[in-house]
Image (cartoon, rainbow, N blue to C red):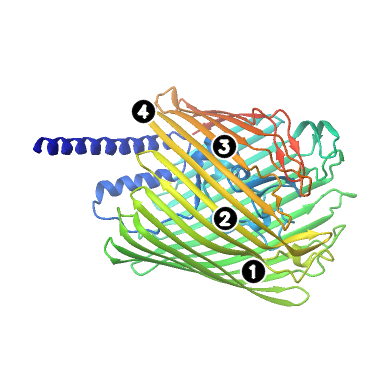
Amino acid sequence: MKKINIYSAALFIITTIFFYSQNINAQTYLIRELKGGIWVTSQVEITNAAQTNQTNNQASLAKVPIKVNNRLITSEEIDRMGYKNAQEVLANQPGFVNKGTYMGNEVVDPAGANGDNMKIYINGVLMNTAKGNADAGVDLRRIPSNLIEKIEIIGNSIYITTKTPIQDILLVSLGYGAYNTVRPSILFSRNIDEHQVFTFTSDSYYSDGNYYYDFTNMSGDNIKGYMKDNRQFIVNSSANYKYTFDNKNYINVFANISYSSSAAQYEIPPINKTDSWFTFTTLASSVSYTGFSDILDYNISLSYLFDSFVDRPYFQDGRFISDYKSHAIALNTTLSRMDELLPNTITLYNKLTPEYRYDILTEDTNAIETNFYYYPQRHSISLRYDMQLSFGYWDDNSPIFSIVPSIKYEYQNDQFTNQKNNNYLAYNVGFNLNFYKGYGLYFCYMSDYTAPTFNDLYYGVFSNPQLLPESYNQLLTKLTLEPVTNLKIEASYAYTTYTNKIIWYSTVPENVDTATSHIFTSSIGYDIPFAKYHKIKTKLGYSYQLAYMGKDKLPKIGLPEHVVTALLGYDFIPNHKVLSSLSLNIYYTYSAPRPLSEYRPIYYSEVFHDFNISFYSIWFEHLIFSMNFKNIFNKTPILSTYSIAKPFTWEFELGYNF
């Protein structure tokens, strides 16, 4: 019996040492990989901080609130999948669909809603304007992937965080690809001193989009030939300045400006006419102060958003059809506190967020068309409360059971020809159970709303001032399993209903529609570091997507019912003077036929096989060379107003990391 105990103890010690060494190797590898310059993000800072804490402070770390209701997409995942902007990333996530080129934007819709229902945040700044964009939402093509550190999806809200490298870096690159695609970019970050960090990025993108079409449309006509209907020119720049005081409080200043000019064919062939030419200019900026104390952690932020939309700028004698300018100013404060009611047993987290926002829409009266007789204005005051009550901890930041409720109240005052007051309420209640370390089950119910836009309410004779807000209710459950190091299994199911959906019947919008969606997703990912300098990354995913629109239960246009994804990546980081690092990634997506019509009989597309290959390498520690091949199996695009499958494209990129 003693021998058995001795053997058991020895086996336990060996196993512990093995898994501990695996974790350390994985962390060391990750740091080297990020320092190699392929994925330069502040994850380095997070990893280094964790190691420093483990080395220098064996005491328990301070408790932090958990995040379980989000879907997280990292910059590494974006690069591995070969996506070049936030639009491509989101359009290929479960529960979202590429609406195609519409109103000059390339739009992403939630399964049961439209682009205006999604709230897009960049570094905490809400990008949506009160004007709205005729259901087109925010054009996420204006946010390049090399600017993104992570994307979080919570319900219909998208939170994009930009990169803030802690190391000095100057990275300049130039890409060229199919359809005369040109993509120059620069990433600059410098630690001015121990207190100050400045980061600047700038990107440009141009493509003539002169795709070749050869397919039969819904009218039975054969569409064949080149159509210059997807031309796109985008310039994007951002700057971030952070000053950290000796007590770790800090000031952060952020600004992002983008300009896009696009041509979009808004009629389904055989009508071969392109007169939709739009320009967009957007500025998102914020100044914030974050402080930490024994009593409260707090943040004060002032943000300003400007958005200009010019409809066909050279339509007649150099005059534009219309020119709308939206301005929004927001002031918000967050107050938060984490209390350990019983040390390492019961914790209570409270967070309060009051906010004031002012929106105004102006219109150039020299335009050919004017549709707003007065300048609509909106004052919004909101108060949000978040709480987390946790019981028991597997380790410093893994509570066994947590209750996670939140509630938000918003008051809106609209001023147009008269004043209109509205009151809105959103709430969420969630439960999270970590039944073992690395094994979690989350369940929540969420209720949210979307206020009618200025377009819906006040757009001349094509409006309806009596519209109600669209409501959104969701049941979500998520299971996460991490049985061994580097192996992660996830599954989730979301049931969502939309009511009072605003539909533009004829020329006037009405609250007449409903929608229901069922989204099931599952994935299994495994990282295999081996032989010191090598790593294989694998991930397999499946999603079942079903959305019914209206009382006739018509399918959501462009949403495939079944999607299967597979990722195989190989990294080699020898840190050699000639070849510093290399990453090869193969990403495959199968999607079932997609509905292409919003009436019966329903027309469906063919099956899609999207096959992407991306290759990244660093030579002589500074020279960067990459290749991207996308949609390899797509010989011809399928075009409709709401769904577009892009053809095979390729791109080469050459850069230098100074």
SS under mark 1: strand
Q: Closer to us: mark 4 or mark 3?
A: 3
642 or 495, which is in the foreground? 495
Q: Which mark is residue 116?
A: none
| Mark 1 in CB contact with mark 4 (< 8 angstroms) | no
Q: Nearer the viewer, mark 1 or mark 3?
A: 3
Mark 1–mark 4 Cα distance, whole angstroms, equals 55 Å
The answer to whether the residue labelled 4 contacts the one labelled 3, judged by CB atoms less than 8 Å apart, is: no
Counting residues from the N terminus, which is met first, the one under dot 1 or under dot 3? 1
- Decide: marks 4, 2 in contact (CB < 8 A)? no
Q: Which residue is mark 1?
A: 358
Residue type at the position of mark 4: Phe
Determine whether the residue tagged by mark 4 lies in a helix, strand or loop.
strand
1 vs 4, front mark: 4
Disc with the residue nearer the chain's start (1 vs 4): 1
How far separated are the C-alphas under marks 2 and 3? 20 Å
Horizontal side of 235 relative to 351 (left or right) equals right
Q: Nearer the viewer, mark 4 or mark 2?
A: 2
Where is mark 2, residue-wise? 495
- Residue occupying the far left of the picture: 2
Disc 1 crowd rating (10 Å Cα; few below 14, some 14-19, many 20+) is: some
Q: Which residue is mark 3?
A: 564
| Horizontal side of residue 550 vs 349, given as left or right | right
The amino acid sitting under disc 2 is Tyr
Does the CB distance between marks 2 and 3 fall below 8 Å?
no
The residue beneath circle 4 is 530
